[in-house]
Image: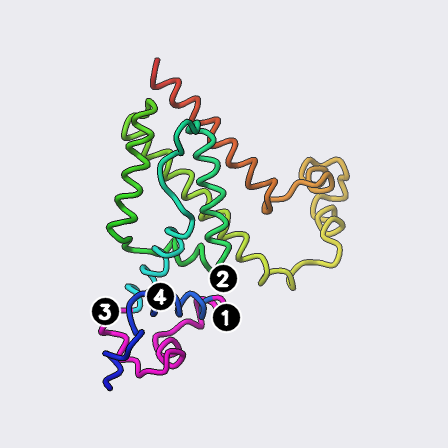
Amino acid sequence: MCAATRPGLTRQTLIETALRLLDEVGLEGLTVRRLAADLGVQSPALYWHIRSKQELLDGMADAIIVAAGLGPPHPGEAWQDWLARRARAFRQSLLAHRDGARIVADAAWLSPATVRTFNDELTAMVDRGFTPVLALRTITAISQYVTGFVLQEQARPGRQAEQPSDPLAALSGLLDGDTSAPLLVAIRDGARTTGDDAFEHGLRVLIDGTIAALTAQAT
């Protein structure tokens, strides 16, 4: 039987297998040849279902976004609570896969179903008093914040070996031993640029800013 017509070899199978491989080898190690070998077929067989590696990556990005369960607010849900829930779900979906944020950030295309879901979200925001422009800018700003935040989170493991054994002492040295320097005090008091607390702070700033923008729009 021709590999291209092999039972079970579908575009969805390719995407699911590619996401599993992504977790194993990372984006740099994910190649069409590696994917074909994992599926037990020759590389040309994959091109019956995808036209290029970028199309495969776009399909993977779409799957990651869909897995976040995005969509309009629930009945009776405040838009502020919905935006926060949406952002948290999106972050977890990106974190669920190695290099997930890089995959989504580099996507050139999303499925029609995902685009329609996105439009449904904007429609719900317009129904709650947003202009289409403010709705689009708000969703875009929060989505880009989440993606950028996770890019930093997923980049950190590779940087751990570069860290000094005593980061606070090293930082104090850079600041001429000034133990009252705001940067040193903030870090000593537990401030972090990644992690849940940092994420929630940035998210709250964005939502509070949106409240102010919506108020200004109304006046």
Q: Are marks 4 and 1 in contact (CB under 8 Å)?
A: no
Q: Taking 107 as reference, is 181 above or below it? A: above
Type of amino acid under label 4 = Ile
Mark 4, secondary structure of its residue? helix
Q: Secondary structure at mark 2?
A: loop
In primary-sequence order, the first of circles 2 and 3 is 3
How far apart marks 4 and 1 lie (CA) works out to 14 Å
Expressed as whole percent of the image width and height from the top left, the position of residue 147 reads: 44, 48
Q: Which mark is residue 24?
A: 1
Q: Which residues are magenta?
A: 23-52
Determine crowd level at label 4: few under 14, some 14-19, many 20+ residues with C-alpha closer than 10 A: many
Work out whether residue 21 or residue 66 is closer to the camera in this orientation and state it. Answer: 66
The residue indicated by pointer 2 is 98
Q: Residue furthest bottom?
A: 1
Q: Quadrant of residue 63?
A: bottom left
Task: Give percent across and percent down for residue 175.
Answer: 70, 43
State how far apart marks 1 and 2 are (Cα).
8 Å
Specify the amino acid type for callout 1: Glu
**Tags 1 and 2 touching, CB below 8 Å:** yes
Q: Quadrant of residue 121?
A: top left
- Amino acid beneath label 2: Arg
Q: Which secondary structure class fits the magenta region best?
A: helix
As helix, strand or loop, the secondary structure at mark 1 comes to: helix
What residue lies at 46% left-to-right and 52% top-to-bottom? 93
Above-or-below relation of 83 to 218: below
Residue on which the image places disc 4: 15
Which mark, by number, is residue 51? Answer: 3
- Quarter of the image where the C terminus is located: top left
Instruction: State the CA–CA distance, disc 3 to disc 1.
Output: 24 Å
Label pair 3/1, CB-CB below 8 angstroms: no
State how many labels appear.
4
- Circle nearer the N terminus (4, 1): 4
